[in-house]
Amino acid sequence: MSEPSRPRTEKGRGASSNPEGRFESRTRAAVDDGWGALDEELPPLQTVVQPERARTVIARNDSPDIPFEQSINPYRGCEHGCVYCYARPAHAYMNLSPGLDFETRLFFKENAAALLEQELRRPGYRCSMIALGANTDPYQPIERRYRVTRDVLEVLDRYNHPVGIVTKGAAPIARDIPLLAGMAARRLASVFVSVTTLSDELKRTLEPRAAGPATRLRAIRELAGAGVPVGVLVAPVIPFVNDAEIEAILEAAAAAGDQMALF
């Protein structure tokens, strides 16, 4: 269970508190007991990563508002710590907070690739594009060590299965460009790189641990240069925050070689 919510300013983190999840029947709060407890320095905030043995790996939906029927989320929680992330409330299913827990208590699905291969080998399996990055970023920093996304891609590559990726993890995805290029040559892979702003200062506020705008544009350039169909995702568009940048982001992404755009 997460600790009582207590405001804290933590460099490189999107949340400043740890409120209870939506399914909790009780809430807790830090209260000044007269002994100066609230003035005490908080312990350093560290990222903790735990393995998860998933029972299934492909999530399916039939929503007319979602452009894919199948998705895989290699991780729970996301170290990027984006302040606007719609996936934060999902941490309640782990009895954790959508606040700091979401970006510091992470889980990797250690058996994702094995489960995926079992799914693809089933006689009744119907092939349709699998989306990576539907909930949390498949190329968040811990992918460098745990390689769950890489293992999933290798299975999809062996089975000639189409995949679509959405990420703001520019450096980690660069590692997999040769694999993605081979899949793209068979029309099996496409990538959207999320670019929310061209301002480093605004990026640090909205997406504390994500790659900077220039690094993401470089990733678009490298993917395009390798023959991988690549687009830019301009989202979320926040009125009076980044809406004035839409045209500039599209121009910068087009100059880097993107072929598509989503909002």
Image: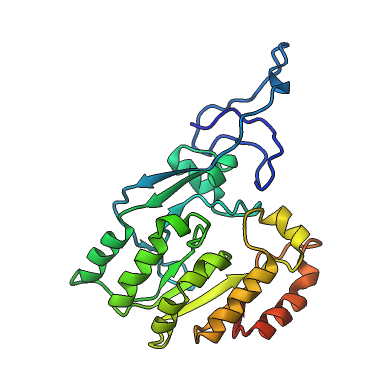
Q: Position of residue 93 (x, y in %)?
A: 44, 43
Q: Position of residue 132 (x, y in %)?
A: 45, 66
Q: Is residue 11 above or below residue 71?
A: above
Q: Is residue 148 above or below residue 48?
A: below
Q: Is residue 85 above or below residue 259?
A: above
From the viewer's perspective, tell me whether residue 81 is left or right of residue 162. Answer: right
State the residue in front, 74 or 209.
209
Residue at image location 32% in from the left, 51% down from the top = 54
Residue at image location 56% in from the left, 46% down from the top = 103
From the viewer's perspective, tell me whether residue 236 is left or right of residue 21. Answer: right
**Farthest residue, direction left:** 123
**Farthest residue, direction top:** 34
Residue at image location 39% in from the left, 82% down from the top = 183
Q: Position of residue 199 (x, y in %)?
A: 77, 65
From the viewer's perspective, tell me whether residue 54 is left or right of residue 147. Answer: left
Within the image, what quadrant is residue 30 found in? top right
Within the image, what quadrant is residue 181 found in? bottom left
**Quadrant location of the C terminus in the rendered image:** bottom right
Count of picture labels: 0
State the residue in front, 12 or 83.
12
State the residue in front, 1 or 61.
1
The answer to whether residue 263 is seen in the rendering is no
The answer to whether residue 168 is seen in the rendering is yes
Judging from the image, the colouring scheme is rainbow
Q: Position of residue 118 (x, y in %)?
A: 22, 64
